[in-house]
Image: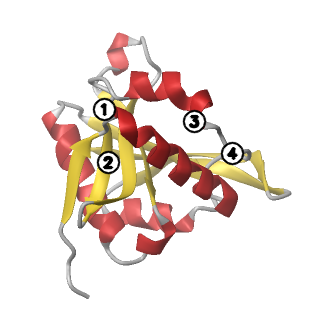
Amino acid sequence: MAVQQLEYRNALPDDINFVVELYNSVIAEGGFTADTQPFRVAEKTDWFAAIRTAPQQLFIVLLNDLPIGYFYFGFWRQGRMALAHTAEITYYLHAAYRRKGIGSQMIDWCIAEAKKQQFTQLLAVMLDINTGSKNLLLSKGFSIAGHLYDVAIIDNKICGQLILQKSI
């Protein structure tokens, strides 16, 4: 399969519609987030404004100028300065672009960007039933740092959360 050239840019104010639409589609699919109900754009306006500012930048992933995903770094235990070098990554990719190597490219770029931002540890928290993301991150050198068993109910099924970690 040919490698597709992705572009990344900081989110713009108008990207809120895409971000909410993609996130709602992931919620509807089930198994990718612990949120179970869709959001209205108005419910995400404050979050979106805050997450777009450094250092919690939200990046839009583009293929042929079309937004297909996004990711951002979140503070791990915000306000605790001893943890300021650790970031949690959150990422979502439109279903039509999964399993094509695009997620792999996106994570590579994310890791490089985290280094630029001087993070030394990356964490990812995910549902343990999200085997695609788990396997992707494991292939990128993340390791399972923790497993919280039976903490979530998704589609009437009990599942846990994994914490994956990578030193960079």
Residue that badge 3 annotates = 41
* CB-based contact (under 8 Å), mark 3 and mark 1: no
* CB-based contact (under 8 Å), mark 2 and mark 1: no
Spatial separation of the CA atoms under disc 4 and disc 1: 23 Å
Spatial separation of the CA atoms under disc 2 and disc 1: 10 Å
Amino acid type of the residue that numbered disc 2 sits on in the rendered structure: Ile
User: Which residue is painted at 36% across and 21% down in the image?
Assistant: 83
Residue that badge 4 annotates = 38
Q: How crowded is mark 1: few (under 14 residues within 10 Å), some or many (20 or more)?
A: some
Image-based side of 48 in relation to 159, left or right = left
User: Which residue is painted at 48% across and 61% down in the image?
Assistant: 134
Q: Between label 2 and label 1, give the one nearer the viewer.
A: 2
Spatial separation of the CA atoms under disc 4 and disc 2: 20 Å
Mark earlier in primary sequence (3, 2): 3
Q: Between label 4 and label 3, give the one nearer the viewer.
A: 3
Which quadrant of the structure image shows residue 140?
A: bottom left
Q: Residues within 10 Å of mark 3 (few under 14, many from 20)?
A: some
Camera sees residue 30: no
Q: Between label 3 and label 1, give the one nearer the viewer.
A: 3
- The quarter in which the C terminus is drawn is top left
* CB-based contact (under 8 Å), mark 3 and mark 2: no
Residue that badge 1 annotates = 57
- Count the marks: how many? 4
Amino acid type of the residue that numbered disc 3 sits on in the rendered structure: Val
Above or below for 79 versus 52:
above
Which structural element holds mark 4? loop
Disc on res. 60: 2
